[in-house]
Image: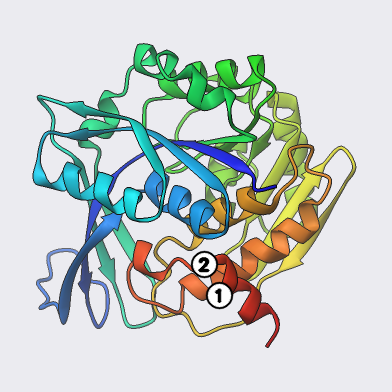
Amino acid sequence: MANQVTVLGSLNVDTTLRLARMPQPGETLSTENKTSAAGGKGANQAVAAARAGAVTRFIGKVGNDDAGRFMVESLNNDHIDTSAIVTDQTVGTGSAFILLDEAGQNSILVYGGSNQQIKSAEVTAVEADIAKADFLITQFETPQAATLTAFTIAKQHGVTTILNPAPAAKIDPAILKVTDLVVPNETESAILTGIEVTDVASMDANAKKFREMGAKNLIITVGSKGAYYSTPAGSGFVPAFKVKAVDTTAAGDTFIGALSSQLKPDLSNIETALVFAQRASSLTVQGLGAMPSIPTYDQVIAASQK
């Protein structure tokens, strides 16, 4: 049976500017190309989960504008239930501006817009969408107060909670106490724990620190190197697949969404799910744009058989 995944998260229209290299302070460069597409960490994660086979619902907020209608339509195109997306009548839809160089590396500027207007009461109003899920995922592109409300409701219904603390920010300690699995990248993990990620020993130290803060299970994504995991049952490192990256935008989001589509709620198959998530992420970085590059389940399986 397919996993049921609910995402509380951000909805942004992404504008990508392609450059030969990143500009220096005070420097003006011409762009080689400009494209716009649906994005936002929450939306990307939901699409990744849906394309990988999960029954997916979305909790979020858009403005009463063309960008908001475009975002909802984009999720509907991937058969994501958008009935819990609220329209804000005063604040516009979120947006992101992505600078992408020839090496496939990016720098991203985000305007939160209506994403930052999600209220705890609006989350409580869609408790049924949370209760149906096997997993509830959220990030830090929406208010932490809404996250705490959502995770608290999830735990009342036996739903496994996944926190992607990105962009890194000081965490309300109460959130980690209702977080089953925290999934930062190495930079975010170091910011949150104060322990730099340099090797397996430092990753173990990060896991210990997160356990002390309340989160018993940890995955640290380490870019092209792979992903570290730690649970009460054990820890390990799953290498990434070696590919030529064209655009790393949404690689982490694809990883989390794909992971949630395959992971068992008790995390007992975490290594197998991690391999699937790594493969999905490796396909995303080989295409341009965030959401357009996220693979389907069949594409991941086909790539695994090569």
Residue at the image point whose x is 55% and y is 75% from the top: 299
| Residue type at numbered disc 2 | Thr
Asked whether the viewer can see residue 224, the reply is no
Mark 1 element type: helix
**The quadrant where residue 226 appears:** bottom right
Q: CA distance from mark 1 to mark 2?
A: 5 Å
Q: Camera-side residue: 276 or 140? A: 276
Q: Is residue 162 above or below residue 22?
A: above
Mark 2 highlights which residue? 296
Mark 1 highlights which residue? 299
**The quadrant where residue 98 appears:** bottom left
Give the percent coordinates (x, y) of residue 36.
19, 64
Q: Camera-side residue: 117 or 65? A: 65
Residue at the image point whose x is 58% and y is 23% from the top: 131
Residue at the image point whose x is 49% and y is 69% from the top: 295
Residue at the image point whose x is 22% and y is 32% from the top: 114
Q: Camera-side residue: 103 or 154? A: 154
Asked whether the viewer can see residue 77, the reply is yes
Placement of the C terminus among the 4 image quadrants: bottom right
The residue at the far bottom in this view is: 306
Local crowd size for mark 2, using a 10 Å CA cut-off: few (<14), some (14–19), many (≥20): some
Residue 61 shows which numbered tag?
none
Q: Is residue 190 above or below residue 59?
A: below
Give the percent coordinates (x, y) of residue 192.
56, 37
Mark 2 element type: loop
Q: Is residue 64 above or below residue 258?
A: above
Give the percent coordinates (x, y) of residue 68.
18, 42
Give the percent coordinates (x, y) of residue 197.
65, 53
Q: State yes or no: discs 1 and 2 in contact (Cβ < 8 Å).
A: yes
In the rendered structure, the answer to whether residue 124 lies left or right of residue 161 reads left
